[in-house]
Image: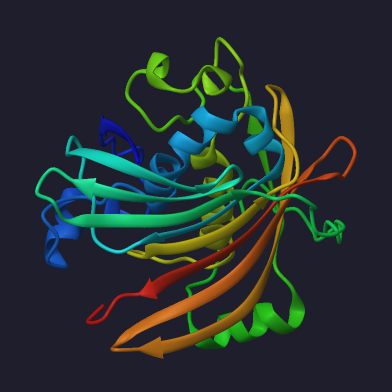
Amino acid sequence: MNSWSAIALNTAPDSSNRIHGDEIAKQYGFEGGLVPGVTVAAYLVHPAVEKWGLDWLNFGFANCRVTSPLYDKESFKVDMNLIDEASCSTTLIKSNKLVSANAEISLTQELPVPPTRRNDPIVDDDYKAPKASFDLWKELQQEGCQAFRFFWGAENPLTYLSENKDLPVLLQPNEGGFSNFSFLLGCSNWSLAGNAYMNPWVHLQTISQNYRSVPKGTSIISEMEVKDFYEKKGHEFVDVNVNLFDEKDDSCIMTINLIAIFKLRGS
């Protein structure tokens, strides 16, 4: 078993989702603002990127689940258990020995047929999403969702560690320059929040398949569809699929299944 350790970074302390800010998070019983689920997922796959490199960026599959909060500046380790030469499991363990997240990760030997872009309407810059509700999810399920445009390669791109030199070389903005898992999964989070206003909300799980690596200068289009929405133990959940495409040629970059609590119990 291999282990990798680091210090957690809250990459979204000023997000419109105030679960990442201390004040609102503490109102819901957390110790402080939550490190985003997409950042936690990036920690889980970091050892896989180190091991498989560009192959993982092009063919990687990951099922990442967040099971308990991770906070800014908490120390943690990720244990990587190799199952065979093309698959592993990872577990994120905090310094207090509590498990915060886990994942099953693999190199896909034969990629599934990629989805094709539907050409959903891309939102205007001033678009304001309606408030999330079961009625809204039903409407979006039946009538379709808004698409969004994102860009990888800005001057200060989103990364998941405080020092870029600690990233795998492929993911260092001034070295390999390829997009990291936190940014790409972030596109699904931003698409979800862009279609329905939620505050606060909690990212729980993503199941994702890479179809190709994303170099600097890539304009990405995200298209979303609502799979399901339901109530469980007082929380209200939504389950969506998000597909990412290279705007230049409409080739599929990644497929993401995202499950989140869009309304916390008592809110």
Residue 59: x and y in percent read 70, 43
Counting the numbered discs, the total is 0
Quadrant of the rendered image containing residue 247: top right
Residue 262: x and y in percent read 41, 72
Using the image as rendered, state which of residue 258 and residue 221 is in the foreground: 258
Q: What residue appears at the point 23 percent right and 56 percent down from the top-left corner? A: 99
Using the image as rendered, state which of residue 17 and residue 244 is in the foreground: 244
Using the image as rendered, state which of residue 39 and residue 16 is in the foreground: 39
Residue most toward the top? 174
Q: Is residue 243 visible?
A: yes
Residue 154: x and y in percent read 59, 22
Residue 8: x and y in percent read 26, 36
Q: Is residue 14 visible?
A: no
Quadrant of the rendered image containing residue 9: top left
Residue 263 lies left or right of residue 213; in this view the side is left
Residue 87 lies left or right of residue 144; in this view the side is left
Q: What residue appears at the point 55 percent right and 10 percent down from the top-left corner? A: 174
Q: What residue appears at the point 26 percent right and 81 percent down from the top-left corner? A: 265
